[in-house]
Amino acid sequence: MPDIGNPAGFDIATVLTGSGLTLLLSAAIMLYGDQFQFSSGELYAISGGVLVVVGFLFGLFLVTTGNR
């Protein structure tokens, strides 16, 4: 099966997965955020920072292995 690339200019599967993960994190913060010593804003910032670092490291891994 040929690779059609990114016909919309971005990878739709990655965008949908990232959006779903963001919604799950938001729901978890809304439901369980009061059980932590951090405010909701701080929890959003921490989770966003973690996602940025994980995405950067994964992208770096893909580049170094020659997959991107």
Image (cartoon, grey):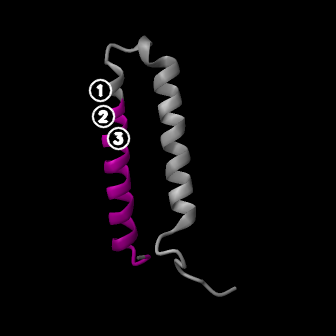
Q: Position of residue 46 (x, y in %)?
A: 31, 33
Q: CA distance from mark 3 to mark 2?
A: 5 Å
Q: CA distance from mark 2 to mark 1?
A: 5 Å
Q: Residue at x 54, y 79 (%)?
A: 7
Crowding around mark 3 (Cα neighbors within 10 Å: few <14, some 14 to 19, many 20+) is: some
The magenta segment = 44-67
Quarter of the image with the C terminus is bottom left
Q: Main structural element of the magenta stretch: helix, strand or loop? A: helix
Q: Indicate the amino acid at tag 1.
A: Glu
Q: Position of residue 23 (x, y in %)?
A: 52, 39
Picture layout, residue 27 above or below residue 32: below
Residue 45: assigned label:
2
Crowding around mark 1 (Cα neighbors within 10 Å: few <14, some 14 to 19, many 20+) is: few
Picture layout, residue 18 above or below residue 23: below
Is residue 57 left or right of 34 when viewed as pictured?
A: left
Q: Position of residue 11 (x, y in %)?
A: 51, 68
* Helix, strand or loop under label 3: helix
Residue 46 falls within the magenta-colored stretch = yes
Circle 2/circle 1 CB separation < 8 Å: yes
First in sequence: mark 1 or mark 3?
1
Quarter of the image with the N terminus is bottom right
* Helix, strand or loop under label 2: helix
Q: Indicate the amino acid at tag 3.
A: Gly
Reading the image, the residue beneath label 3 is 48
Reading the image, the residue beneath label 1 is 42
